Image: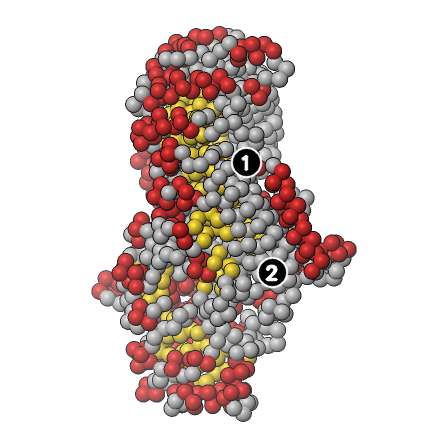
Amino acid sequence: MSSEANKKDNVQLDLANVENKEEATKLKIIGPSRYLKNLRITSMRERDFSVLISTYLSTSQYYSSIDSVPPYLRSLVPEDILNKIRKQERYIFQGKQVLEDVVEAPDPILNLATDLAVGQLIQVIKDEFRFRFSNVRMTTRTNVEKRAVLAKIEAALNKENMIGSGKRLERVISVDVSKCKNDHEVLQELVAELGLHTIDELREIITKRNYLLLLMDGDGDQNKNPWEAGRHEYNKKTFAVFITTESSAARRKFAFAFGEIEIRTEDHLLPWVVFCRNVGCDLVRSSTGIHRIAVQIVEECRCHLHVDVMVGRLLKNVQDVEIWEHTLKKLQSTSPEVKIMEGASRVMVNAFIIFWESLDPIKKDCLKICLSRVYDSDLKSKWIHYGLLQTEQEAEEFLEELLSYSFLEEKSSYFPDENIYFREEINQTLKSLNKLNLPVTIESKSHNHDAWHTAVVVDAQLSDLPLSPNCPHLRAVVLKDNPDLTEIPQLFFQQMPVLRTLYISQTSLRNLPSSVINLMELKVLKLSNCKLFRGLPPEIGQLNNLENIHLDGTQIAHLPPSPNWPHLTELFLQDNPHLTELPPLFFNHIPLLQDLNLSSTSIKELPHSFSNLMNLRRLYLSDCELFRKLPQKIGVLKCLNELYLDGTYLLHLQKEVKELVNLKSLALCFYGSSHDTGRGENNMQLSNSTVIPAGVISNLKSLYSLSIYVNFDDKRWHENVQIILPEITGLEKLSVLKLYIPKVELLGLMSTCIARLHQFEFIVGHQMQQRIISRAPPAVASKLRQGKKSLNYFNGVDIPWEISVALQKVDTFFLDRHATIKDLSAFGFKNLHKLRVCVLGECNQMHTIADGSRSSSLRYMLWNLEFLGVFYMKNLKSIFKGVSSPQSFMMKSLQLYNCPKLKTIFTLNFVDDLFFLEEVVIEDCPKVSTLISYESSKQQERSFLPNLRKVSLLYLPKLVTISGGLHIGPKLEKIGFYYCPKLKSLSMLELSSNYLKVIKGETRWWKRLNWSQAGWEQNQADHLKKIFSPIDEERDIMTQLTTDEDDTVKNDANDTYDDNGDDDNYDDLDDDDTAAADDDVSEEEDEYADE
């Protein structure tokens, strides 16, 4: 950072949030304009307050700015205080508005503030891998408070057992800086304290030992700026704390260096302010009794802001002192009614129980619905649908109440339909309360008929139900997510005459009892994902009020022969592999059916009664691999809007489909010659049929989405497509198109159509022997499927103009087995500037992906590129060549597989531009020795790849270092290794992340690492050993390294470091072994040449 940027406002860069374009330009961090609108400079004041919030939350996350704190946590702090912090105001609890809204802090609260400030300091010192600060300024309100803080720091260090040999701190040294006239005297004081003779001895020892220096300025006129007292003598080994007062002249001269933090005791009045704001300041002032209890409540909550908010709102407008006393006792309970989950706060559990007890039974049932993740809009509709709440307004008010308590957490604020759910701590407490109330949950419905309309038991390990509960007014039973529930008593539904909703998904039920015949008012039946459920009772066909039936994900093989469901609108039967046929008369009495889902079943055809579904809107037959043709009368279903046949093997499309004039979405998949072996009858039909008859597509003028999947070697399609393409281009409403085009020349016919499409996927090229995508890792294949505008070009020669023109609209490009291309610049950089995803496979003439030395326009191609995947490239030697740009590229993920000649991943000048890179995967590149190649011998002090989160390195026999000793990935969370035998140690600079959660690797490799060679202190090495998770070699290696599904740290590998027999197979490679590795590369190249 330039001194110009730092001299006035003492700012640090938070590149995830920058607004100041001019300042960003000066600091050379300017990037594409779409990112700049969200960029702004984060002040040190804001960073310090965010660290305070981080320590309050006791989370492993470290928040560097207000905006990086999750919204539900940020909402706990009053907005006017956050705004003051953003404006860099020091005194956030002063000013007219704040003084009116806050009760003056009594002595116990002031004492609590000093305790919390000292607690924050202890966390910062103790958790060095989370907070990397070596110098802290402690600012107190008064001289008395300053001396109290010093005493509390020393007491806390002793209590935490942090001082001594082998501990976090070897020694604590206290010095009164005010007695020293200059820096030299400060150093002399330290020399004397340590029993040394010279300042040089001091300088040497504090760079190697873990000391804590407590430097305190004087009182009144003796104030001195402690920061000036030898500040340059301290490094990250020696931790320095400067204790001063807010009124000290030192404050006015104080200037931060990079990495320093200020802890202010006044800021720790925040819990008192938050509680008073939520309960009402006038109420706290109204009574000495209430004031006394309010202080005790805040003391009990300490720094748990969520509890301050919750209890404050529960007691708002409550003037009865006895209720306040009762609340305090419940909050102080050391024997809560429910089991406290590991890592949870006792006071938080107690507070939630108080809230739970304040709710009426109906709202308790509403909360139980929240135990599973639900959509915001779904949640309100479910409360009403189950009869829990009566109106939309009631549902909205209760949802707002839950949000105001910050109980519910949004997964993402970027997608409006994302799930919202309880925070884990709340969720586990609610589950325990749910189980606690199980004995009376259903039985109690019979005692007060008017009050009970819904029975909800969700995710509670329910296994038994009452034999025959008397519930004449019960309207809904919700028993989902109870895997231990295997049976419903035969008479269970005998006395539930008005039951309308039966929701028992994700249980272990095998069948329904015959008493279900009593549920004549039943409208909704949900048995989704009951994996053991095998059949419906015959009586089910007589429940003529049913509107929705969900039987997806079960084991049913048979359906009622002719059910009488005149009101049924939804029937979901997908994911039932044992369902092979539908009864001939099945659809005779289901006239209002609108949604029918039969995907992933084993049906071969639809019955004749299917033509009775005159109101059908949506038909799903995806992945029905035995399904061959639609019924001839399909054309009578005039209301059909969506028809999905992807994943089937249709012989051809019936011409009657042209009558479906209201069809908006159509997905087709056709049987091809690769499936013809041994099917003589089908072969005959194929040879005499056209895939899609002429005039069908052109008549479907309402089509919005069209997907046609065929076998690439189906010769019928090669002829048919020339007729179909003009019909497709004439569909004016078409917005989504997925299509295989066998000849590049035909792509030119689509140029006008491509311009108006919002989403497309074109696969272009002649017949191929084996599509490389089938061998690509799942993450690469998934990226290709996610593209909105995708072009797959395979088996190409030269650069057809049709491809170049199409690329101008493409965001996802897969280049497969191109015979002549040498680097991507051949397509023209300006044609590639919209690319987000680029995947390259077996382009064996490529030596580099993009050559910047040939054109100054390389940045156009890289401008928006976020994902680059490369595999099976036998001659590739580098990724980017000659790159030099003042702009940050948008690349977030780089994945390289099976490149035998690749040596250079990143050069020093290119890695500077990869600000947004989050993931690197390198597999089977035998000549790679490091991720970053550079020749300069000059020590690089700065950090690279600031947003790197995940690194996976596999089958790299020559890898000796991760980044050549450069400091990379300050936000790295996960790193994994497999078969990297020459990697003998892990550098401190390469693994300096505050966020590192897991290291994956082989146990035998981990045991052989040399920690002393890398300069790790024992406590630092111990920390890494705690987060090591051994690879299970019986499972897929890549999945373990690149996903988060198995990141549970296992410490078995760290219990002992004795060699065993397995280590003999993992000896370090010597020169002969290296030569053998080179021979393997040569053999691999020969294999590529043979192909």
Say what amino acid the circle numbered 2 marks: Val
How far is mark 2 from mark 1, CA to CA?
A: 31 Å
Q: In the rendered view, tell whether residue 778 sits above or below residue 44.
A: above
Say what amino acid the circle numbered 1 marks: Ile
Left or right of 382 on screen, residue 430: right
Residue at 46%, 20% in the rendered image:
718
Marks 2 & 1, CB-CB < 8 Å contact: no
Q: In the rendered view, tell whether residue 919 sits above or below residue 287.
A: above
Please tell me which of labels 2 and 1 falls first in the chain: 1
Residue at 43%, 44% in the rendered image:
824
Q: In the rendered view, tell whether residue 826 sits above or below residue 1011.
A: above
Residue 111 lies in quadrant: bottom left
Residue 627 is tagged as none
Q: In which quarter of the image is the N terminus?
A: bottom left
- Residue 890 position within the rendered picture, expressed as x and y whole percent measured from the top left: 39, 50
* Label 1: how many Cα within 10 Å (few below 14, some 14–19, many 20+): some
Residue 482 lies in quadrant: top right
Q: Mark 1 points at which residue?
A: 772
Q: In the rendered view, tell whether residue 689 sits above or below residue 821.
A: above
Q: Name the residue under label 2.
A: 960
Left or right of 114 on screen, residue 1087: right
Residue at 42%, 73% in the rendered image:
136
Of residues 829 and 193, the one nearer the viewer is 829
Residue at 42%, 29% in the rendered image:
744
